[in-house]
Amino acid sequence: MEELIRIGMPVFNGDSHLAETLESLLNQTYEDFEILVVDNVSTDGTQDIANEYARKDSRVKYLRLSEWVSLTENWNRTYELASGGVRFFMWASDDDLCHKDYIESLLPPLLQNRNIVLSFSQADEIDMKGEKISELYRESYPKGDTTFKRIQSLMQVHKFPAINGLIRTEAISWSPCFHDTSIPVDLWFLIRLATCGVFHIVKRPLFFKRTGGLGETGHDPSVSHDPLTTWNVGEQEWKDICRLNLSFFDKVYTFYRLKLLAKCRYPQFKTIDWFLRPSFLYIMLRQDPHYLGLRSRMRSYIRCKIMRERVISKEDW
């Protein structure tokens, strides 16, 4: 007997790739699912595309909100509307793609093992044209038999398409699902989910994460977030971590590992506690062996000075 799965798709101005995404979902080898498209008052052709697919395929449902809400609110609303009465739920973005075997490959581990709360696959990153940019989730991915190991693994991964995996709905007891903190909501969601059970990864690249388009809020995700307001891990984040079902040691580790990750992402903007500085330097040197090298800094200084002199000489001329 097949399990009904619901896919929630929060969307805002997604007409560029919405049809392509819906095609990749509707052509799945596993067919017993429904797609709920929740339109955050789009101003482009999103409504027309979604309605066209809803007419062609009864598995597609379309709902347009009466007024615009934030990204977090729309993802929470989508979950509340789509997850009721089903054992398994999946979020979908309006521009990502799935291999035809995606759902069929993710479901069996969840059916065989009740301890698994999230099943996802290896993934590739693609550009706006659908061309492969890089590989995601090959060796480092959220894994581990204990909560501590799963959270530790999450902290080592910088891109999180696992949020688009298949989720056991009974594992999510939070309302709302997503929670506004200065930490990206998908990472925070996965940290919370890691306390509920085991993650499973299918070792085939079956998911294709698109980079460079408009996000659900209508903002360009290729533009960096404001470092002064993003990843600002402090007192509020510590209070949120303390609510998780973790040992005190795990809570302390999660808090300071997030602070370290914030510093590594924005080294010139974030301060860091003195006892974390050796770890920070170690991570930065692993990423770039010349991070502390005088040679590279001297080269940059000379290059900037030469360019400055060239500009001045042209102005004089």
Image (cartoon, rainbow, N blue to C red):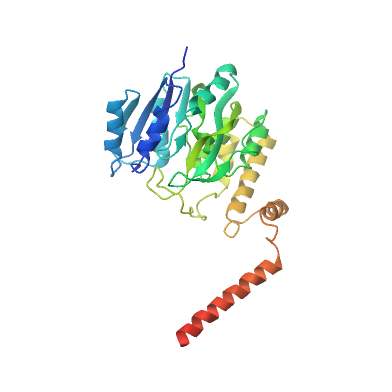
- Decide if residue 73 is on the left or right side of residue 282: left
| Residue 170 seen anywhere in this rendered image of the structure | yes
Across and down, in percent, residue 284 comes to: 67, 54
**In the image, what residue occupies the spot 58% across and 77% down?**
305
Return the x and y of residue 297 as percentages of the image width and height: 66, 68
Q: Residue 24's quadrant in the figure?
A: top left
Against 80, residue 222 (above or below) is: below
Choose between 149 and 173: the one closer to the eye: 149
Q: Locate residue 28 relative to residue 194 in the image: left or right.
A: left
Furthest toward the top, the residue is 1
Q: Can residue 66 be seen in this snapshot?
A: no
Relative to 146, residue 20 above or below = below
Q: Position of residue 2 (x, y in %)?
A: 46, 15
Residue 25 coordinates in the image, percent (x, y)? 42, 30
Position of residue 174 relative to residue 45, above or below, is above
Q: Is residue 272 above or below residue 247?
A: below
Question: Residue placed at 42% from the left, 24% from the top?
Answer: 6
